[in-house]
Amino acid sequence: MKAPVRVAVTGAAGQIGYALLFRIAAGDMLGPDQPVILHLLEITPALPALNGVVMELNDCAFPTLHGVVATDDVNVAFKDVDFALLVGARPRGPGMERKDLLEANGAIFAPQGKAINDHAKRDVRVLVVGNPANTNALIAQQNAPDLDPRRFTAMVRLDHNRAISQLAEKTGALNTDIAKVTIWGNHSSTQYPDIHQTTVKGKPALSLVDQTWYENDFIPVVQQRGAAIIKARGASSAASAASAAIDHMRNWALGTAAGDWVSMGIPSDGSYGIEPGVIYGYPVTVSNGSYEIVQGLEINAFSRARMDATDRELREERAAVEHLFAKR
Ligand code: NAI
């Protein structure tokens, strides 16, 4: 067994937390030979519920769970952590404008970014799941001036997995037959699920499905899947979101498969003409723990328009929260 690593999860007593913690503790994220110490952060009123979750975690007697810290103090939660999954966020209330939502989340993600800056390991890997995930990740990153900005990422992996599943179902293939799906941009309804480079059993996906299905069914189904789950289940996607968070962190830590890539929300370096600095969904490969944007993909006019639209939304979101950034 390796030495244990510390994994922080915020919003740990919430829905996603309940689907996520047991899988991290069981070794699904970092492997069966990597013990973890969980650092669980909640708001004070949720600490009794969190205590119940900790009791259940202990009752599983997981071989890979070497300790649990449960706290409502951000400075304790991020002390010496190697991984941080920021799940807890302020949901949109009735009649709440996007601007108010961004502001309310700024009050959560600015102090968390600062606490990560002050207390986490210097090579911490941060994944923001709480919505609006891309801009929350930017707020946290901009309050952590001592850390490499590339340590802050946002989750578009659930959208990526949804796209794989939709395409597998349509073509009668297995999920594992699908490669090179991309989610460009924001984890919102402006995201662009792109299958121009995608293959199904090695064949171009767009030679197996018609353009009308791609434009009128596939893209809106993937974009609006979150709302469809809420309508069907009466609650938002939690288990699939937790599973995607595990996938994101596992690939970031352990690498991506040869001949394939994954989608991660990462700080734009200007690749593909996207505004530098915004946290944008890109196709990436990971080796030796470091992600790289897949370069040189051909972008047609159809894709360009959609990639620019989601870029525009992210630039607008950034403009609305810039006052929350720490001065460098
Ligand atoms: P939930 O409401 O069940 O749980 C959220 C938890 O966060 C609550 O227990 C709450 O007490 C806690 N919390 C709130 N503020 C906190 C703070 N400052 N520090 C620590 N904990 C705090 O919500 P659920 O279903 O677990 O979802 C969490 C977030 O994930 C939501 O913002 C949701 O929109 C987002 N989400 C993102 C997805 C993605 O693909 N990026 C997919 C699905 C959900």
Image (cartoon, rainbow, N blue to C red):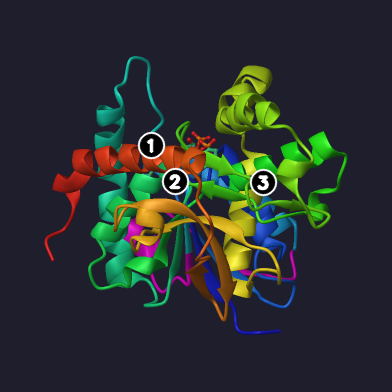
Image coordinates for residue 273, horizontal then vertical, percent: 35, 55
Instruction: Tell me, yes or no, whether the two marked residues, 2 and 3, touch with CB atoms within 8 Å.
Output: no
Query: Is 115 in the magenta?
Result: no
The mark closer to the camera, 3 or 1, is 1
Q: Would the CB of label 2 be found within 8 Å of ligand 1?
A: no
Magenta-highlighted residues: 62-83
Measured in 3D between alpha carbons, the distance from the residue under mark 3 to the one under mark 1, in whole angstroms, is 22 Å
Query: Disc 2 or 3, which lies upstream in sequence?
Result: 3
Number of numbered discs present?
Answer: 3
Q: Is residue 111 visible?
A: yes
Measured in 3D between alpha carbons, the distance from the residue under mark 2 to the one under mark 3, in whole angstroms, is 15 Å
The mark closer to the camera, 2 or 3, is 2
Quadrant for residue 286, please give it.
bottom right
Closer to us: 30 or 223: 223
Query: Disc 3 or 1, which lies upstream in sequence?
Result: 3
Q: Which residue is mark 1?
A: 309
User: Looking at numbered disc 1 in the image, what kind of residue is underneath it?
Assistant: Ala
Query: Is 78 in the magenta?
Result: yes
Q: Is residue 279 left or right of residue 265?
A: left
Q: Is residue 236 visible?
A: no
Image coordinates for residue 261, horizontal then vertical, percent: 63, 62
Instruction: Tell me, yes or no, whether the two marked residues, 2 and 1, touch with CB atoms within 8 Å.
Output: yes
Q: Would the CB of label 1 be found within 8 Å of ligand 1?
A: no
For image coordinates 71% across by 42% down, the residue present is 206
Provide the secondary structure element on which disc 2 rests.
Answer: loop
Q: Quadrant of the N terminus?
A: bottom right
Q: Which residue is mark 3?
A: 161
Badge number at residue 185:
2
Q: Is residue 33 left or right of residue 293?
A: right
Provide the secondary structure element on which disc 1 rests.
Answer: helix
